[in-house]
Every structure is written in structure tokens, then in C-alpha cells.
Amino acid sequence: MAQLEQDEVEKEIQIWVSAQIVYVIGETPGYNYMLKFVNQNWNKVASPDEFLHEEGYYVLKFQSIEDMHEVLYSGPYTINNKPIILKPWTVDFDLHQEFPNEIPLWITLHNFPMSCWSYQLLSRIASLIGKPLFADECTFKKKRISYARILIEVNITRPLPDEVGVCEPNGRQFE
């Protein structure tokens, strides 16, 4: 068995830290078609390197983590009316897993009082559905208060709730 050195592995990890795994629900678009989509729709960032895997997904390696986040947090996206699932690359990503069980999903939380609009409180509420990852700019800066838009990671093998309940310290409850 080959024993790998930690510093060698860390060096390779740093190469891929700004990468995203890209799944298209349904038929995987061809390499050139995907490249055209990326260049037309994600033109606010430097063009990422594109790698097609035989399992039917792409790995896009961005020039920076900021570019990767810009694309991830500006979704959701579709290609030919098929949803695109974007997931940041992680060290434990399995190249041969057919499809992820956990995917990022944008949710909206409606009808919450102003007392619930801190990022910490919205994250706690969103965690009833999944793992909070990010709030859009309007939510984070409280520029839009009719609803909060939060990116969460959910397990797609479990049903999602239609609504969540919240109880304030004074006993007031709302959904």
C-alpha cells in the first residue's frame, strides 16, 4: 500500500478547493454545450476549467473561491428546463457516486416578524428544513422583508416540510 504524505495531499486539495460539482437532472449536456452555457450565464466571473466525468457530472474549477461562491449563491439555474445542482467540492467527494443524497436548495421563508430577521435566527429557522449555507444579499442586508431567501443543504431522500413553526420567547407562535 502506498503511504501518502499529508503535505502532498494538502497541496492537491488546495488545487480543487475552488471547484464545484455540477449535476444536471436528466440527460447530461455535452461538453461544448455546457461550456457555452457556463460562458453565457456565469460571465460575471472568470471562465472556470471544465471537467466531464463519465458518471454524468461536471467538475468546474474556478479561478478563486469568490468566483465559485458568486456562481453558487446566484442560483438556481436550469439548462433546457432541467435543474442544475451545484455543490462545492469537498475532500470526501466520491467520484463514483451516481447522484448526491444531499443537495443545495434555495428556500423562501415568508411571514416572519421583524424580530426574527437576524442571520442567526433565520439560520435556526432554516435548520428545521436543512443545513443553512448562505442567505441572499437582500435577506442578509434586510433590503427585502417580505420573505427571506436562504440556501440550505437538504437530504433529497427525506420529504421536505411544507411549513415550519417558530415560537418566540414570549410564547407567540407562527408558521
Image (cartoon, helix red, strand yellow):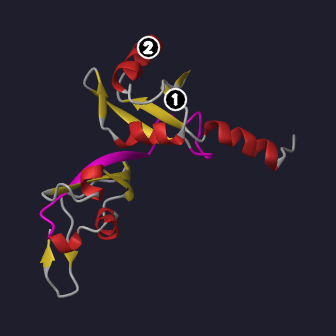
Q: Which residue is mark 1?
A: 60
Quarter of the picture containing the C terminus is bottom left
Q: Which of the labelled discs sits on residue 37, or is there none? A: none
Point out residue 157 in the picture as x, y percentages from the top left corner: 37, 49
Within-10-Å neighbours for mark 1: few <14, some 14–19, many 20+? many
Point out residue 102 in the picture as x, y percentages from the top left corner: 43, 48
Q: Is residue 36 magenta?
A: no
* Residue at x 15% of width, y 59% of height: 145
Point out residue 114 in the picture as x, y percentages from the top left corner: 16, 70
**Magenta region, residue range:** 90-113
Q: Nearer the viewer, residue 88 or 162?
A: 88
Q: Secondary structure at mark 2?
A: loop
Q: Would you say 132 lies left or right of 12 here? A: left
Give the residue type that dot 1 points to. Answer: Leu
Quarter of the picture containing the N terminus is top right
Q: Nearer the viewer, residue 135 or 156?
A: 135
Q: Which of the labelled discs sits on residue 30, or is there none? A: 2
Q: Would you say 152 lies left or right of 117 here? A: right
Question: Which SS does the magenta portion mostly show?
Answer: loop
Q: Would you say 49 lies left or right of 1 here? A: left
Q: Secondary structure at mark 1?
A: strand
* Residue at x 23% of width, y 67% of height: 117
Identify the image quadrant of residue 90.
top right
